[in-house]
Image: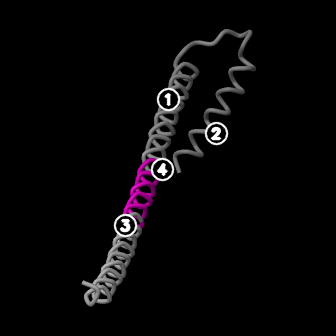
């Protein structure tokens, strides 16, 4: 048995080295896997951020368009009232000014 002891010690040492090597390889693989997952999450976050920004811009554009349409319809109504409704003499000077401003507005927006 004493003759086999150096061989057993050599095998134990070799086994410890192999086990250490396997553990270090496994650790490296885990770190690499974590890095890939981290990169994937960062990509997904960036894609979601871009998507939200484009959705926000689209919503703002819709809001601006609706506001513009509302404003144009209000101006059209005012134009109609000033052009086709009778005006009392008391408000003639004010209505003339409004009529003048609306006329100028239509001329600027027709071109």
Residue 43 horizontal/vertical position (percent): 41, 61
Locate residue 55 relative to residue 19 in the image: left or right: right
Which circle's residue, 2 or 1, is located before the other in the chain? 1
Residue drawn at x 64%, y 39% is 104
At label 2, counting other C-alpha atoms closer than 10 Å, the crowd grade (few under 14, some 14-19, many 20 or more) is few
Query: Closer to the camera, 67 or 63?
Result: 63
Q: Regarding mark 2 in the picture, which secondary structure is present there?
A: helix
Which circle's residue, 2 or 3, is located before the other in the chain? 3
At label 4, counting other C-alpha atoms closer than 10 Å, the crowd grade (few under 14, some 14-19, many 20 or more) is few
The residue that mark 3 highlights is 30
Q: Regarding mark 1 in the picture, which secondary structure is present there?
A: helix
Q: CA distance from mark 4 to mark 2?
A: 38 Å
Which circle's residue, 4 or 1, is located before the other in the chain? 4
The residue that mark 2 highlights is 104
Q: Is residue 37 shown in magenta?
A: yes
Q: CA distance from mark 2 to mark 3?
A: 72 Å
Most distant residue in the front direction: 2
The residue that mark 4 highlights is 53
Query: Closer to the camera, 61 or 54?
Result: 54
Residue drawn at x 69%, y 24% is 96
Magenta part of the protein: which range?
A: 35-53
Q: Regarding mark 4 in the picture, which secondary structure is present there?
A: helix
Which circle's residue, 4 or 2, is located before the other in the chain? 4
Residue drawn at x 27%, y 90% is 3
Q: CA distance from mark 2 to mark 1?
A: 19 Å
The residue that mark 1 highlights is 70
Q: Is residue 34 shown in magenta?
A: no
Residue 37 horizontal/vertical position (percent): 37, 61
Residue 1 vertical position relative to residue 62 in the rendered view, above or below: below
Residue 103 vertical position relative to residue 33 in the rendered view, above or below: above
Q: Which dot, 3 or 1, sits closer to the camera?
A: 3
């Amino acid at each position: 048995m004493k003759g086999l002891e150096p061989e057993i010690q050599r095998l134990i040492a070799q086994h410890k080295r192999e086990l250490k090597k396997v553990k270090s390889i496994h650790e490296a693989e885990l770190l690499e896997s974590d890095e890939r997952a981290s990169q994937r999450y960062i990509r997904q976050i960036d894609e979601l951020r871009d998507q939200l920004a484009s959705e926000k811009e689209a919503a703002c554009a819709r809001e601006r368009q609706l506001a513009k349409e509302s404003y144009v319809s209000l101006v059209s109504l005012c134009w109609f009232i000033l052009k086709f409704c009778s005006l009392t003499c008391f408000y003639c000077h004010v209505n003339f000014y409004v009529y003048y401003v609306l006329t100028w507005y239509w001329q600027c927006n027709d071109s």
